[in-house]
Image (cartoon, grey):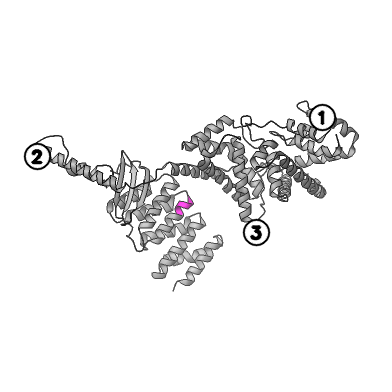
Amino acid sequence: MECHELTEYALGRMGSGPTPDPAVLRPDTAKKPDPMRNELDSHLAGCAACRAELALLEETWETLGADAGLSVTPEFRARTIELLEEEIARRRIRAFRPRSRSVRVLAQAAAILVAAAAGFFAAKGGTGSRPAGTAASEAPGDAAASPDLSGNPRLANVSYRTDPDGKIGIEFDATRRHSVVGRPDDPQVSKLLAYLLSRNAETAGEKSRAITLVSENFGPGAAAASPEIVRALAATLKRDRNPGVRKKAAEALASFRSTSEIRSALLDALANDPNPGVRLIAVDALASAAKEAPDPKTIESLREKAFDPSENGFVRARAASALKAIDL
Amino acid sequence: MSRERVRRGIIHGAKPFAAGNVSAVGREGVAGGLSDDRTLLERIRRGDAGGAEELFERYAPALLRFADRMLSDRDSAEEVTQEVFVKVISRAHQYDGRAAVSSWLFAIAANACRDRRRRDRGAAVVPLDSVGELPARGEGIEARLAGREQRAAVRRALESLSDEQREALVLARYHGLPYVEIARVLGISVGAVKTRIFRAIENLKARFSEGEASWNAMN
């Protein structure tokens, strides 16, 4: 063995996994016979420079072991598992595809035929046929009534769409596939959305999609959010574990015309939310509402935040500049 | 002895790589059988969240440590680790079985780390104070500080290496991947892997020798 081959050989032995260990180079701990070993040993016996080089190499390899590395924290684990579950759920959810015009026409024609047949049999005094209206309303694909939500049913595979005519479409599986279509201010649509937000959505992804639909269809220049929706968003802002979801809920509330309930939810978030991003949204929303109608509680909360040394620097700065902008 | 024999010696020393026989990620890795790994990927493909969770439990520690050693920042390392698993979900159908699942995961992680470093290049580097885990309670404060200093010194030494040298060395030293597998992970030849590790060690030897006095004082 030549001197210049030593490092390459030694590294080859150490880095030949699965257990990189300089000990493989020592005669007494070598685990398996290696034809190179004898050559290495005899070379080392007569070459002081290589002995020193090998010692340095081993030391370097061992020294690297001082870096123990990180371990997975329970928070990181929980956060990632939730993210992965959402990602898988997102891929499972079927894309919401509105029925094509031809299918809709055929469905309507079929409904008319069923209604006509039912009328015919009813006129003949036949029994067992259902009223035409009921049959039509339960035909799949029609704007059926929302199912009874009092029993907290689990609505699965929820998908949303906003039609060009301003109507919202919500499709989901309960005991069967439902499709509820209506204007955002329709009480049935509002009730269903509030239910989806507050009780049904289990993952952050489901909640985020419901909040996005609400943000897009309620607020300035659109329908006013119902008290049920505001309550659902306020509860999400207060209790959801995921800061991304809470931020979305805060943004949605911030986009609505300010009410005492919305202000109260945002004040609570400003005082108690652990995430500075959520608190920043609360500062902006409260400041914006206070500019139009100064409210003592809001002003006091912003002042507290601006002077709180333990508060995040961005939140403090934003609260201070918001106070300056409010005409007191 | 000829260079060729040395080369063969090295390769014989390494575990021969084949898709079926790499069942561990090494000393900081996990013992996940390849067939188990493939079953998990199949479950992920079918939309089974439990499969993703099991794969996370199995590989997250090793991937997190790899990313941390490449990026020297816990937050970035956690983000990259998450990114790897999200990509696994979206690309599970692309896994062709030619390499071990562990190699595939490390390849995704190595690419993600490179992207991250490219993106962050130019941004100020904030060295991490708390490199690695703190020693267990009960150790003396001096021992704790010495251990902490030593870890930080190793981390600084790793940071002094080029990205290419560091990723090859980290995979070999901390994850115990054979050269052939590192070559697959990084998409380079076995010769290039050896060269990178050789140069990395030469750099580290010089660095550790320079700081020998202070290093010994810590021990």
Kindly state the secondary structure of the residue where label 1 is placed.
Answer: helix
Q: What chain does mark 2 sit on?
A: A
Kindly state the secondary structure of the residue where label 3 is placed.
Answer: loop
Residue marked by disc 3: B122
Please determine if labels 1 and 3 lie on a single subunit.
no
Q: What chain does mark 3 sit on?
A: B
Tell me what residue is drawn at x 53 percent, y 66 percent. Answer: A317
Instruction: Say which of B21 and A229 sits in front.
Output: B21
Q: Amino acid at mark 2?
A: Ala
Residue A8 visible in the shown view: yes
Q: Amino acid at mark 1?
A: Arg
Is the C-beta separation of discs 3 and 2 under 8 Å?
no
Residue marked by disc 1: A37
Identify whether A254 is placed above or below B70.
Answer: below
Q: Can you tell which mark lies on residue A123?
A: 2
Tell me what residue is drawn at x 56 percent, y 60 percent. Answer: A310
Kindly state the secondary structure of the residue where label 2 is placed.
Answer: helix
Instruction: Say which of A240 and A205 sits in front.
Output: A205
Disc 2 or 1, which lies upstream in sequence?
1
Query: What is the quadrant of residue B177 in the picture?
Result: top right
